Amino acid sequence: MIEVYTDGASKGNPGPSGIGIYIKQGENQIEEYHYIGVYTNHEAEFLAVIKALEYCGGEHFPTEIISCRSDAKLVVDAIEKNYVKNQIFISYLNQINSLINIFPHFFIKWIPQKQNKRADSLARKAIINKN
């Protein structure tokens, strides 16, 4: 099982945004961060999950069970219920649903911010470095 921690950050809402992805596979740890442009914080959170799933489903872990963790309650609830009220988020949820189908099993869990410090740090680093 692969543990995937995601976070999105925005400087302003909307504002310059970054995503952080921290992946644990046994003793191996992978860190990814990307500047994504100007988005709201919620959009950045959705995009962090999308980018993490793209990373894992590409060449890296397509046959693994994915356990995703996020401190974004809105995103976790949307994925668990397969429903969003805000029309802006529908395309993000559709992308996530398509990517989830790659994996044999996918789980998502809400975690408190204090348990997501590494992904948060990476998302903020992306904004600062703009890469």
Image (cartoon, rainbow, N blue to C red):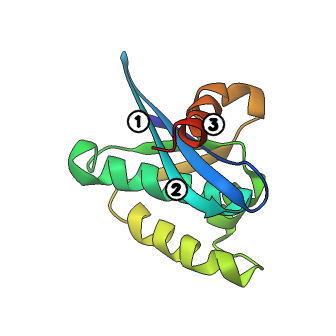
Question: What amino acid does circle 2 point to?
Answer: Ile
Image x and y of residue 21, in percent: 50, 39
Q: Is residue 116 left or right of residue 18?
A: right
Q: Quadrant of the N terminus?
A: top left
What residue is shown at x 36% (from left), y 56% (from top)? Answer: 54
User: Label 3, on which residue?
Assistant: 124
User: Label 2, on which residue?
Assistant: 36
CA–CA distance between discs 1 and 3? 23 Å
SS under mark 2: strand
Residue farthest bottom in this picture: 87
Mark found first going from the N terminus, 1 or 2: 1
What residue is shown at x 62% (from left), y 29% (from top)? Answer: 121
Question: What amino acid does circle 3 point to?
Answer: Arg
Mark found first going from the N terminus, 2 or 3: 2
SS under mark 1: strand
Residue farthest top in this picture: 27
